[in-house]
Amino acid sequence: MNNSVKKALTPSTGLVVGASAAVAVGTGLFTYGAVVERNNFEVRRESVAILPPGSRPFTVLHLSDIHLSLNQRKKTEWLQSLADLKPNLVVNTGDNLSHPQAIAPLLEALRPLMNFPGVFVPGSNDYFAPMLKNPFSYFAGPSKFKSGKVAKHQPKKLDTEALHAGFGAHGWVNMANRSQSIPLNGIRFDFSGVDDPHLGLERYAGWPHGSVTQDVAPHVRIALAHAPYQRVLDHFTDDGADLILAGHTHGGQVCIPGYGALVSNCDLPTWRARGLHDWEHNGNVTPVNVSAGIGTSRTAPIRFACRPEAVLLTLVTKA
């Protein structure tokens, strides 16, 4: 090697080359997450054995964390295409918006799905527009999330009444801090939902009151919450829920391949940030489906190793 080449390959030159390579890799990963993966929508399919004996299979389409902003054509078209699944029920567990002017586009995106029966509960981004946050705040320990009320001070209120009225006009039922029975396909479904636990707004309504024989008549109890805080899962599990549906976590949103989520944005263990799991408390066990969500916050428009999803749950008879 001649002297001029040796001179060029100094330690400082190596540092510059290494830093440039790291920047290039980082830029590539960000571009992939912001352009490709966040629009790489999928339908996760699960089966849950909770129906009374003799019941036919019943499909539930679980939507969460749509976070619709303006001019999101790919997301809108994909949402509309989900009507082809012909679910027996649509459940929306909140955080529908990511822009104050996105209510009309959201209702248009969901219009084909609102031809099916539906129930919903709100999340914080159905009340307040997203704001820029320190990303490292998500890595605070579980104690940060114990009491809820961690996102109550938001800069801009959304027109929540218009959003909920749009859902209600198509027959979707608001289950925030209330309960209701809905007969579907010959099965009595008892729903109990709470307002967003991330804002500390949950109030438990119990299960619907029916006839004097309601406890022995065939029925299915489904609980709804936006954010799957442990206190909420404990309550519904102890109260006899057959299934709990929640979102909020975005599945971690930016994950490590082969490891999974680094954060859950609540006190739920990170390995439960996405998927169908059994929740155990006081000797009781209830399956919980946590959706990784469909969108991202407008202030953090990236996903990595965590594709956006809707979940199609097929309910079948108990073994």
Image (tube, rainbow, N blue to C red):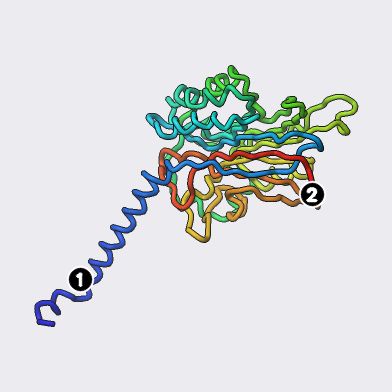
Q: Residues within 10 Å of mark 2 (few under 14, many from 20)?
A: some
Q: Position of residue 147 (x, y in %)?
A: 64, 45
Q: Amino acid at mark 2?
A: Asn
Q: Which residue is mark 1?
A: 13
Q: Position of residue 95 (x, y in %)?
A: 53, 35
Residue shown at the point (20%, 71%) measured from the top left:
13
User: What is the distance, in whole Å, between disc 1 and disc 2 at their CAs?
Assistant: 62 Å
Q: Position of residue 92 (x, y in %)?
A: 59, 32
Q: Which residue is mark 2?
A: 284
Secondary element at image label 2: strand
Question: Nearest the camera: 178 or 312?
Answer: 312
Which residue reaches farthest top? 169
Q: Position of residue 258 (x, y in %)?
A: 51, 61
Going from N to C along the chain, the mark reached first, 1 or 2, is: 1
Secondary element at image label 1: helix
Q: Amino acid at mark 1?
A: Thr
Residue shown at the point (67%, 28%) measured from the top left:
175
